[in-house]
Amino acid sequence: MISLTNILEDIKNDFVKEQYRNSIVLTRRFVLAKGNVISVSMNKNTDLCGIGIDIPDETTYEELNSLPKWKGMEGKDNIVTEKTGTKRVLSFEQLEGYDQIIFVNVMKDVCDNLEFVDKRGCVSTIKYTLQKWSVFFRFEKDYVLSANVQQGLYSELIVLEKMIKKNGNKALAYWTGYNSESHDFYIGKDAVEIKSSSAKGPEKVKISNEYQLDDSGVMGLLYLLYLSIKKSEVDGEMLPEIVERVMIQLDCSQKEMFKEKLLKVGYVYSMPELYTYHFRVREESCFMVKGNFPRITPKNIHKGIGAVEYVVSLDACRSYMIEIESFYKGVDYQ
């Protein structure tokens, strides 16, 4: 597979060579394993880069118009004339003011996927890949996850890793927190909500809405799993470490599924250098959410009230605590 980063670096180096002294744009052309043709270019004055992909002449404008779009990248359908005739090229250009790292990673994913299809399947493959990334760009989020979001993801992956060790790699399907579901894990008839805190003092958890601790829609049991986390800039492990530990336990198709799930959270697998916070689990506790467990649910709020957020003190929940080992043994694995 081609390395766009290395190619762009080579083009930068070419600009200083005597034969390219007057060149503004340089382009490299590559033929992939299944015959797809890729052109990589860079502008000397702006450092902006672009990727061109040869597409079938019969590609319809409806197909091209259906490709996902987002700020920072522009797609164009071009007719290119060569000695042997004309051809259609779908080009993607990095726009000024937008991050090249993200553009290159998106285009690398496109190129990697084009290694496995011939020219007839290139447009549908491009569409699939861009749709996957469009989730990442949907809310125009900062691609560097905040410390709290990294901590939350780390906590969920710690639990996922334990579930995989307990019940095999099919446990990847249990994890739904990446998709903004009501609960972070659905395991058989049971559901699990994950909360973590790195704050000192009394243990409290923030509940983001009235559904997180609502067990009325859960056929089995609802568990609240709490992780006390030490967060540091130097001590502990970083997100890429736990991601890799999970990754090596998955088969090939699951690895791609895992990457897509991470992307929906905002974690870019190909950019581990972005995640520099360190975490360590101090303690793990589990509570069974039922009966008079301290909580707000849709049943006990008045109509017209929404966007409910509240804090639960875990000291008030001790009577609902179960042994953490009992949770991992007893949850409804299917």
Image (cartoon, grey):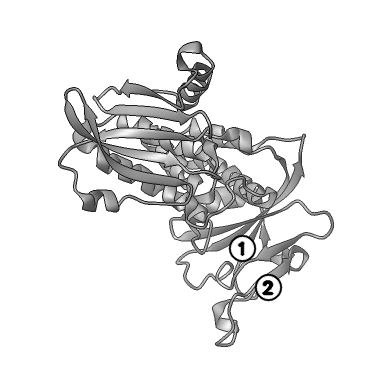
Residue type at numbered disc 2: Pro
For disc 2, the marked residue is 294
Q: Residue at x 27, y 40 (%)?
A: 78
Instruction: Measuring from the top left, give residue 295's x and y in whole percent.
Output: 65, 73
The answer to whether residue 70 is seen in the rendering is: yes
Q: Earlier in the sequence, mark 1 or mark 2?
A: 1
In this rendering, position of residue 285 left or right of residue 4: right
Dot 2 lies on which element? loop
Q: Nearer the viewer, mark 1 or mark 2?
A: 2
Quarter holding residue 97: top right
Give the mark count.
2
Viewer-proximal residue, 276 or 331?
276
User: Which residue is at the front of the view, 130 or 280?
Assistant: 130
Judging from the image, what secondary structure is the residue with disc 1 in?
Answer: strand
Residue 22 x %, y %? 47, 21
Which residue corresponds to mark 1? 288
Residue, far bottom: 303
